[in-house]
Image: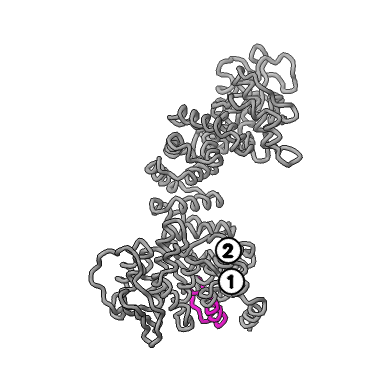
Amino acid sequence: MALVTLRRNLYHLSDFRIHGALAALKTQHVNHVHKTVKEHLCQWFWSLHPGPIRVRFHHAHCKKFHSENGNDLHPVGEPGFSQVHSWDRFEHSVKNVDEEMFYRKLNSFTSSGEVLHFISTLETLPDTMMAGALCRICEVERKDGDQRLPKEILESSAFQALCDRFGRNPSDLSNAGLVTAFQALTLLCGDAQSRLLMNLEAECQHRLERGSLDVRSLCILGETLIKLHGPGCLALDLIIYQLQGESLEAFTPEDIVTLYRLLQASPEKADQQQKFLNKINHFSLSLVSNLSPKLMSQMLTALVVLDQTQALPLVIKLSKYVVQHIARFTSEELRKVLEAFIYFGHSDRFFTETLEQHVASLCLTLDPELVSRVMEYCSRKLILSEPIFNAVAETFVCQAEKFSPSQTAKLIEPFGKLNYLPPNASALFRKLENMLLTHFNHFPPKTLLKLLHSCSLIERHPVNFMAKIFSPYFLQQLQGEESYLDRLSLAQLTQLFLTSILECPFYKGPKLLPKFQVKSFLTPCSSLETPMDFHLYKSVMTGLIDLLGARLYFASKVLTPYCYTIDVEIKLDEDGFVLPFTIDEDVHKRVALCIDGPKRFCLNSNHLLGKEATKQRHLRLLGYQVVQIPYYEIEMLKSRLELVDYLQGKLFSQNSGGH
């Protein structure tokens, strides 16, 4: 009863053919194309069980096509296409022809003309094979970057005869032939108001409302309607409703991924569908090993769009199989995989190692967008991979002109964040400087500020651009239409200004006005300073009390006049004796203890992050005696006594005195 009510509601809401035709006017580009994997094409159509309707195609020299039920098709002439490859003799009747051979030959063609010429040599052809020919035409046209057919193909008698068969009696078509032809013609022609598409769509709607479409047909129809009318298409809810009623065991891996894509089209409804999504996520665990790289990429993309953070076990399992097939991913597919891993916060040592080999092997042929995504992945996960960074640096030096401003920024920023200079650092930053000099105004203000700040973290100070970024004009651009500058931008400007004073004394350009300077580099996102590890601090504090005799002799979390926050500060007099932290007179030396927990280092490394190395460098220039207390040294100590001896050696290695 619920299904009948839903169908009636959909019927009375609007004639979905008219609704679809109007919605198509708003669609200017086809956002997604029909999945066609060559190695599965034959198996897919074999499973569709072609219906009894067959069309007799006479050779192109004949003037008419005939169908087995006696209905004549429109006359067609010889299609004026280039000569096809020479084939072994192919039977004129498909009744006894091996279907696998048909699709193997079909997949060999590289132009629409070859496909049309090929099928015109066959006498009888099931509707699913005709639809397969349309899919192949769609596939070869897509390779040229334009999914629409050239005018000479659209107007050719061979193509029109093929289309006419689907348009004259769509009710006689099998489900598979109907929906596949509808999808292919939607991609090839794209005109929702054409009579042919409207007739096919009406027949699809009729069968949908009747509940006579199988899982595969429902999936194909759903994607086609989204392409034709957008995700707001009324029939999509009914399609998903019917798919929910099917057993997931009836879905092939391709069907499951298509189902994800259908749900992905309306992410705002994910909460309503969460119970169903949980079921799909769990079932998909058993299918991962059977997915092609393309399907893995599409599944991960759908999980991101649908915000399936609870599906981390599925993401982890997908990552294991991504490792096995990483060389088979296209640049676009691998980019989507990386975006998903970034989104879910997932990193895997084996994936990183495989990615290193893949990037290093491609090096100068890497796609700029993929390069920027690889570097963003390393940056987000704090992965300092020298093979990746070196290959990327070489790629940029050789092909900098291919990178957009945003791609350039995403490529360079990780070098500063992870505190790494590649072997070709001189050539890299010379190329970057030339790009900035030429295209300075093409960089968005915040992107430019982040880029220049990243350079300063690894002591590649942007002296030639400081006058510009401290100018009122740039600061106004940076602020945009907001009433104030965000705290992160102000902190980056302040640190660049401090850098100009401490490390670039020869800079004599404009200064940063006080109103644009912050008092502390500790920001909510911890971009310029990493908060102290509390548990590590407690261990060190216990040892310091034992060593110095009282808590009075050191201060914690001290904000300096130079915006940095010192984890622990100890004051010494001229003789090297420790003073109480409350005393400001007779202070001869200030010791800054940097209690560096794991978050201040690159992942699984003893390599300090750029912001932490810069902080310690600046504190030394400001006159502090910087003492680093890294977590990996503390973890080696086995007793409290060893801790005290360790701290004494760190603090007073050159002084015999102490409190």
Residue highlighted by disc 2: 265
Q: Residue at x 65, y 32 (%)?
A: 492
Which residue is the site of mark 1?
Answer: 236
Work out whether residue 1 can be spotted.
yes
For the record, the magenta segment spans 201-219
Mark 2 lies on a secondary structure that is loop
The reply, left or right, for residue 372 in relation to residue 140 is right
Residue at mark 2 to residue at mark 1: CA–CA distance: 10 Å
**Residue 505 belongs to magenta span:** no
Q: Which numbered marker is on residue 506?
A: none
Quadrant holding the C terminus = top right
Of all residues, the one furthest to the top in this rendering is: 575
Residue type marked 2? Ala
What percent of the width, then of the height, locates residue 317? Answer: 46, 57
Q: Quadrant of residue 651?
A: top right
Kind of residue at badge 1: Leu
Point out the residue furthest to the left here. Answer: 88
Q: In screen coordinates, is 135 left or right of 120?
A: right
Looking at the image, residue 517 lies above or below residue 402: above
Query: Looking at the image, which is closer to me, 639 or 359?
Result: 359
Q: Are marks 2 and 1 in contact (CB under 8 Å)?
A: yes
Instruction: Classify 320 as above or below 210.
Output: above
Give the residue furthest to the bottom: 70
Q: Residue at x 44, y 39 (%)?
A: 388
Magenta segment includes 210: yes
Specify few, some or many for label 1: CA neighbours under 10 Å numbering under 14, 14-19, or 20 or more. Answer: many
